[in-house]
Image (spheres, rainbow, N blue to C red):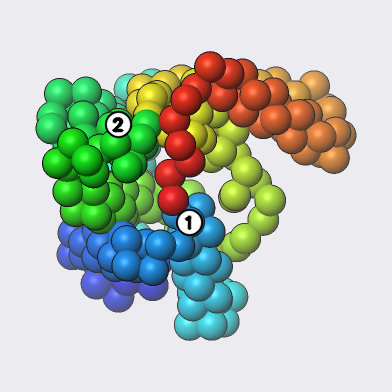
Amino acid sequence: MWLLMPTLGMFSILVIPLLGLATGFIVGVIQVKAKIPSFILTLSVLVIYSGLTGTISGGISRSVRGYEFITMRLIPYIPTAFLWTIPIIIAAVFIMKYTKIGIYLYAIGSNEEGARLAGINVDKYKILAFTISGLFTGIGSVIYFQNQGGSVPVVLNLNTMVWPLVAIVLGGTPLTGGSGGPQKTILGALTFTVLFRGLTLSFIDPTMIQLITGLLLIASIVASSRGSKGVMIT
């Protein structure tokens, strides 16, 4: 997606979220038809995009201009990228708590077979969930890369894959599905960010921070899974 920014200019602000939406839809269809576990499938797509961007770019970062309105400070001491995420968070919470889509997704996450027997079109709503997730990912990519001041190829590292999981389970959303929500994930992300920044500013060795992150992930999974009777989303 990063390559579209300098090529399409401001128009890429619309194109990139749509590309994310299309990717989410395709991934959803593959998951529903091939029954591939969601985690494995999305991780595979991450690896594919990483290789694709690296091949096209040759591993070279590219500066992008013309998006200053996204990154310029509107309120002192508050990153503008954070302000741009507020309407996204509100939209996600509204969808999950106050619409039929959210109610059905909670039901599917809690007991997929039970939801199917209740008359819910499970395949349809799983594809819709992937599609919405892809759209939000596209929007987030625009905000993130412009906040960095340029576009770089996707680089896979341990943090890329582990930190989102820590934020999710630390916020109280079990990997078994059926409960949780966007607002909890945001709280988990903020908590982990404060913890990580604190450890970094305390000059803790990076390898020790990784150790603490791993232990925190295990502890969060155990805590969030206690009493959960849902089934793993696949």
Q: Position of residue 140 (x, y in %)?
A: 35, 47
User: In the drawing, what numbered circle is on residue 106?
Assistant: 2
Is 68 placed left or right of 150 in the picture? left
Residue that appears at 35% across and 51% down: 137
10 above or below 207?
below
Looking at the rendered structure, the secondary structure element under dot 2 is: helix
Q: Nearer the viewer, residue 35 or 78?
A: 35
Looking at the rendered structure, the secondary structure element under dot 1 is: loop
What amino acid does circle 1 point to?
A: Pro
What amino acid does circle 2 point to?
A: Tyr
User: In the drawing, what numbered circle is on residue 37?
Assistant: 1
Q: Residues within 10 Å of mark 1 (few under 14, many from 20)?
A: few
Residue that appears at 70% across and 30% down: 218
Q: Nearer the viewer, residue 176 or 181?
A: 176
Image quadrant for the N terminus? bottom left
Measure the C-alpha gap from mark 1 to mark 2.
18 Å
User: In the drawing, what numbered circle is on residue 225?
Assistant: none
Residue that appears at 40% across and 24% down: 180
Q: Position of residue 126 (x, y in %)?
A: 27, 50
Pointer 1 or 2: first along the chain: 1
Is residue 191 in sight in this rendering? no
Q: Position of residue 78 (x, y in %)?
A: 40, 24
95 above or below 131?
above
Is 222 placed left or right of 25 in the picture? right
Residue that appears at 23% across and 43% down: 116
**Residue 80, quarter of picture:** top left
